[in-house]
Image: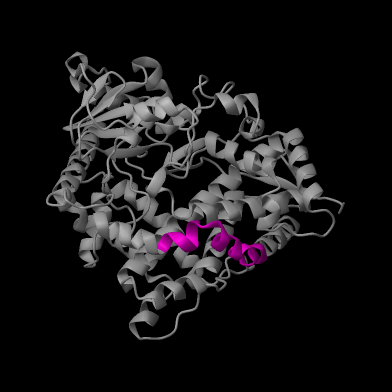
Amino acid sequence: MFVYLFIYLFISMCLSVALENHSTRWAGQNNCKYQSPDLCPAPPLQTAGPSQHILATAALNPVKSTWDQRRRDASTTTVAEGNSKLKTMEDLNGPSFLTSLYWLFIKGYFQTTHQMQIEHSKIYGPLWKSKYGPLVIVNVANAELIEQVLRQEGRHPVRTDMPHWRAYRELRNQAHGPMGAKWQRIRSILNPRMLKPKHVSSYSNAINMVVTDFIDKVAWLRDTHGQGVMVHDLAGELYKFAFEGICSVLFETRMGCLNEVVPEQTQKFIVSVGEMFRLSQLVILFPKSTWPYLPFWKQFVAAWDYLFKVDDVQEKLQLGQPVEGEYLTHLLLSEQMTVTEILGSITELLLAGVDTTSNTISWTLYHMAKEPEIQEKLYQEVISVCPGEKVPTSDDIANMPYLKAVIRETLRLYPVVPGNARLTVENEIVVGDHLFPKKTLFHLCHYAVSYDEKVFPDPHTFLPERWLRGGEDRSKQHPFGSVPFGFGIRACLGRRVAELEMYLLLSRLIKQYEVKQDPAGTTVKAITRTLMAPATSINLQFLDRQVQ
């Protein structure tokens, strides 16, 4: 018990430092016209402390609300009349520091903090506070309340920073994430070719080439290692696919991830990503003054060094050598961004896009195997749009609503980032019947809302039909009930590329193979390790279909 307490005190200290650092960084920036940054060169997903999802950052999905009056109410940035009747943060219930420690370490929720969202909302209601040493976090587990927070975050929303990731950037003399107008300038350069459909659709052929290789890789894996039917550790193989896919877009070159023998540099990059996330969980447990003396600190720095190397791109740029890649070349030729800004942007897209695609498709195929009737319905839609040998393209995807619904339902059940944080910096805001001051740290519990039966009837059932237009369930849904990709200007930069990858891969896999469960009948649960991922390997059977 005392060991856990000791560790937890360190965690609280780090969280406090993170919050203080952001407050300091914001000083003097109040006249800035734009939003606070989350892009370059800071890593894309920033989590810390005992509840790793609390500070995980992934923007929310932009959704058009049909409830106009509620939208107007939620977007209010001034305190309503009669605010003297409003409650304050002091009136909120919630677990104490020791109670939080008990839940995380004694009850065992440290790696399933997404489930703890649900349990705490049952005890304390949709709005409660958690104490982690000197840090107080306001948890929001209600779709309407989440909307109120997001619509009142102002022009300069701030996300918490990971102190150990910040320390690496200081060690390597790299700029911190840009603020305000600088962030907006960078994002305006990156957005057109990553978010506009006409540009994203141009990546269809490159991604389809990678999909073809993955389909062949599945056949090779099952024939050489799976007795002709099984593919083991599907998430690991899909990670290689996603990495290969995003590199084909960014660099317009192949990295060899799907070869029988993966090139050494490519394998090292993949390993470095895993090491970075794994060691982050260890480093954050200790105070900053001890980091250089930790036995794994050098490994942590080395992992980051390789991520920013991006397969010798940095060295080539420094030597003035040409760099391949339509997207990367576009950024270089535009001369609107520095090399550091470009490398940070590329690294973010690699880190964010790979995990989103690989984890989501892993869970999707897992459910396709468990729900054969849903798989058959999807198969019939795919072959009706792309019969015979026709290969699906981005144009065909527009005619596959059930395909999109399947992916959307997977993201509801398994959001890659189950919760994210917002720090109010401009105004005091009203959420529900409570008034919160500036610099309140909100934890938006997206996972809990995704399983709220008032928002999603029968929430534990995999039901793609709930996302189809005209469906009864769709009309009742709150637009902020499931928002995995972002909200407004802070929407996930790689969203459309990730979606295109997932749509093309899933449609072609289901057209080529019938997916069946592992004969062992293994049930796979989710775990939160910075991101939500399968706790154990997903092993599935892939049986050849006859061409129709």
Relative to 36, residue 208 above or below:
below
x 57%, y 68%: residue: 262
Nearer to us in this view, 209 or 60: 60
Q: Which residues are magenta?
A: 190-210
Residue 449 included in the magenta stretch of the image? no
What's the magenta bit mostly, secondary-structure-wise? helix
Relative to 294, residue 67 above or below:
above
One can see residue 115 in this view: no
| x, y percent for residue 46 | 33, 48
Q: From the viewer's perspective, is 164 left or right of 20?
A: right
Q: From the viewer's perspective, is 401 left or right of 346?
A: right
x 18%, y 19%: residue: 90
One can see residue 375 in this view: yes
Nearer to us in this view, 95 or 99: 95
Residue 198 included in the magenta stretch of the image? yes
Which corner quadrant of the image does residue 457 belong to? top right
Q: Quadrant of the N terminus?
A: top left
| x, y percent for residue 433 | 28, 18
Relative to 109, residue 488 above or below:
below
